[in-house]
Amino acid sequence: MNSISHKKIIIFDLDGTLTKSKSDLDHEMASLICELLRLRYVAVTSGCSFQQFESQFLNGLPESSNLCNLLLFPTCSASGYYFDGKQHRFSQAYTNLLSVQDIKKILRSFQRVFAETEYVHPAKTYGPIFENRGSQLTFSALGQKAPLRFKRKWDPNQQKRLRIRRLLRTQLPDFEISIGGTTSIDVTRKGVDKTLCVTKLKERLGVGRRGMLFVGDALFRGGNDYIMKSTGIKCISVSGPKQTKELIRRIIQNVKVVPFPDT
């Protein structure tokens, strides 16, 4: 834990780590994040859109939160948002938008894979199953607004999505295709995935990989956080928000006796 207390940047996954899937930040977690922001930089990366970040995460933070120390990376880090102190809002620093042609190609590829695998859509869905998030196209098998209790049952071992992803990769070699959340598959431009936030944080803050820590609930092989291990930064696996809270408390307790590191 002492080595963790010297990290300058703590990077979190969102769904399953800071919150339950597409659920609002609870009061206890919000208070802990607020405290951590006083002591260190905090970054959050997720497959969700910035609008989802706002409703699920930002709106739950206390007004006293030091947002200048918060950096957000929606759509698997395909875009980045930093707080503008003068404008008092988060501004988009970069993006990797998919073109209209890209979207059409991705959708056609999904349809071909569905036909090849004889995939049958669930009888009941909740909202659109495809969402164009600008820099990412997301397929959500049960729909964007499906209750968590249903999503957890649909593909608990990821086998359905892994099969679809494997075939999509043959159809879309020029795109990144990753498993997201509990029922989703995310498609971004080639070379754009969660690890991009590490590069962007280094550029923005001048912090090397040794100064970063990643916390996520899917660091196992095939999980949507697994790719973060390839960056060489220290990664800690958690089972859910409850364990994340325990980790943040320990970090805060140790950080309070360690000055903000110079290196």
Image: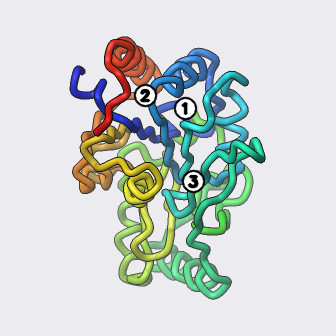
Q: Is residue 141 above or below residue 3?
A: below
| Crowd tier of the residue under label 3, counting other residues whose Cα lies within 10 Å: few below 14, some 14–19, many 20 or above | many
Kindly check if marks 1 and 2 are in contact, taking CB atoms under 8 A apart as contact. yes
Distance from disc 1 to disc 3, alpha carbons, whole Å, reads 17 Å
Badge number at residue 40: none
Badge number at residue 240: 2
The amino acid pointed to by label 2 is: Gly
| Crowd tier of the residue under label 2, counting other residues whose Cα lies within 10 Å: few below 14, some 14–19, many 20 or above | some
The amino acid pointed to by label 3 is: Pro
Q: Quadrant of residue 172?
A: bottom left
- Label 1, on which residue? 20
Q: Mark 1 or mark 2: which comes first in sequence? A: 1
Q: Is residue 161 visible?
A: no
Residue 169 located left or right of residue 23: left
x and y percent of residue 168 in the render? 42, 75
- Label 3, on which residue? 74
Distance from disc 3 to disc 2, alpha carbons, whole Å, reads 20 Å
Q: Mark 1 or mark 3: which comes first in sequence? A: 1
Q: Quadrant of the C terminus?
A: top left
Distance from disc 1 to disc 2, alpha carbons, whole Å, reads 8 Å
